[in-house]
């Protein structure tokens, strides 16, 4: 098992009978998306990229390309808001081009681009020793006082749209850091991401619903458990938000799931890896095949 992660290995086989379907969960309070036109962010300079990479080091987060791009957008938003004094057109930016960003990083004498699993890459500093948090590490060394406070707070997330977490783990962790919660004081953003991963995978305090992090009792996982206990199928396919509106995912049956898993594992093998982190499988099914497990 690599780096403490739960992984699927290439030799794994899938069962041969049908998968269940998903049902619609209860009402989930989500923050409404602002109707603000996207503003094209300028192509980042090398200085912009180095500042973004350094800030991720400070947060204990490995600068994977997807995270680096998010950080660049965050910095561009902050700069625009400071310049425009909070005008609406400073609130949203388009993502920068991943290919151009990689080319810029490869040309920098201060950065080293490293190939990661599943077509991902990261940009690390040549002159700074990494001290990144492995957010998939199953070891929980956090005090029980933190978990007691976290459980009470996470239960409140579904009670008000002001408290709801929009987005996935990174965006949700960033929102929690910005809220300056007492029980997270002194923890880096990388540690907050790890705390959220443990809250999802082990503590069952949080879960996912339609791509957003919600209290566990409102999550798809909890819904599936309830349906299993009642021996009834999940009847409604899951949905996800996109710039074009709501997208409905087809639920994969066992034959399709086995075929797509084989494609994912074969692709990983071509890159020299015999495993894929289990936490990535659902995301890959959604992003590559528009399917739900």
Image (cartoon, rainbow, N blue to C red):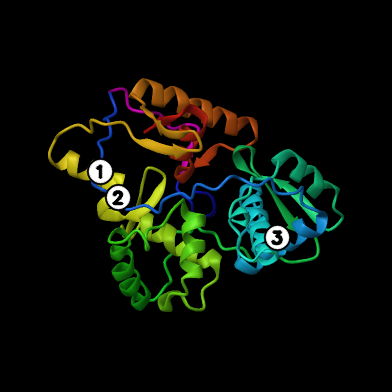
* Quarter of the picture holding the C terminus: top left
Tag 1 residue: 25
Q: Is residue 188 above or below residue 174?
A: below
Residue ID at (60%, 38%)? 118
Q: In x, y percent, where is residue 36?
A: 54, 48
Task: Specify few, some or many for label 1: CA neighbours under 10 Å numbering under 14, 14-19, or 20 or more.
Answer: some
Q: Is residue 156 above or below residue 98?
A: below
Of the image marks 2 and 3, the number of the one nearer the N terminus: 2
Task: Specify few, some or many for label 2: CA neighbours under 10 Å numbering under 14, 14-19, or 20 or more.
Answer: some
Residue 153 included in the magenta stretch of the image? no
Of 205 and 173, which appears nearest the observer? 173
Point out the stretch of residues depicted in magenta.
Answer: 7-17
| Left/right of residue 211 with respect to residue 102 in the rendered view | left
Q: In x, y percent, where is residue 149?
A: 33, 74
Q: Which mark is residue 28?
A: 2
Residue ID at (45%, 22%)? 259
SS label for mark 1: loop
Of 215 and 191, which appears nearest the observer? 215
Q: Which mark is residue 185?
A: none
Query: In this rendering, does residue 136 appear at all?
Result: no
**In this rendering, which labeled residue sits more in front, label 2 or label 1?**
2
* Separation of residues labelled 2 and 3 (CA atoms): 33 Å
* Separation of residues labelled 3 and 1 (CA atoms): 38 Å
Tag 3 residue: 52
Query: In this rendering, does residue 238 appear at all?
Result: yes
SS label for mark 3: helix
Residue 10 included in the magenta stretch of the image? yes
Of the image marks 3 and 1, the number of the one nearer the N terminus: 1
* Separation of residues labelled 2 and 1 (CA atoms): 8 Å
| Left/right of residue 59 with respect to residue 153 in the rendered view | right
């Amino acid at each position: 098992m690599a780096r403490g992660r739960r992984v699927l290995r290439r030799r794994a086989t899938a069962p041969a009978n049908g998968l269940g379907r998903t049902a619609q969960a209860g009402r989930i309070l989500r923050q409404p998306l602002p109707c603000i036109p996207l503003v094209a962010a300028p192509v980042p300079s090398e200085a912009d990229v180095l500042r973004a990479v350094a800030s991720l080091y400070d947060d204990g987060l490995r600068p994977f390309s997807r995270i680096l791009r998010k950080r660049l957008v965050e910095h561009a938003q902050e700069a625009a808001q400071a310049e425009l004094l909070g005008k609406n057109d400073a609130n949203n930016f388009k993502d920068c081009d991943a290919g151009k960003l990689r080319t810029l990083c490869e040309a920098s004498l201060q950065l080293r681009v490293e190939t990661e699993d599943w077509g991902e890459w990261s940009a690390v500093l040549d002159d700074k020793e990494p001290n990144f948090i492995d957010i998939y590490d199953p070891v929980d060394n956090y005090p029980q006082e933190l978990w007691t406070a976290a459980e009470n707070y996470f239960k409140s997330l579904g009670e008000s749209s002001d408290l709801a977490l929009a987005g996935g783990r990174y965006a949700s962790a960033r929102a929690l850091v910005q809220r300056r919660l007492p029980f997270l004081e002194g923890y880096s953003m990388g540690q907050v991401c790890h705390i959220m991963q443990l809250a999802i995978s082990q503590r069952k305090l949080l879960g996912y619903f339609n791509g957003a992090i919600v209290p566990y009792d409102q999550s798809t996982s909890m819904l599936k458990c309830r349906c299993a206990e009642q021996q009834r199928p999940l009847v409604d396919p899951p949905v996800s938000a996109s710039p074009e509106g709501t997208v409905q995912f087809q639920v994969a049956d066992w034959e399709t799931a086995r075929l797509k898993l084989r494609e994912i594992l074969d692709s990983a093998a071509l890159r020299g890896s015999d495993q894929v982190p289990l936490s990535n499988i659902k995301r890959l099914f959604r992003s590559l095949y528009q399917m739900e497990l």
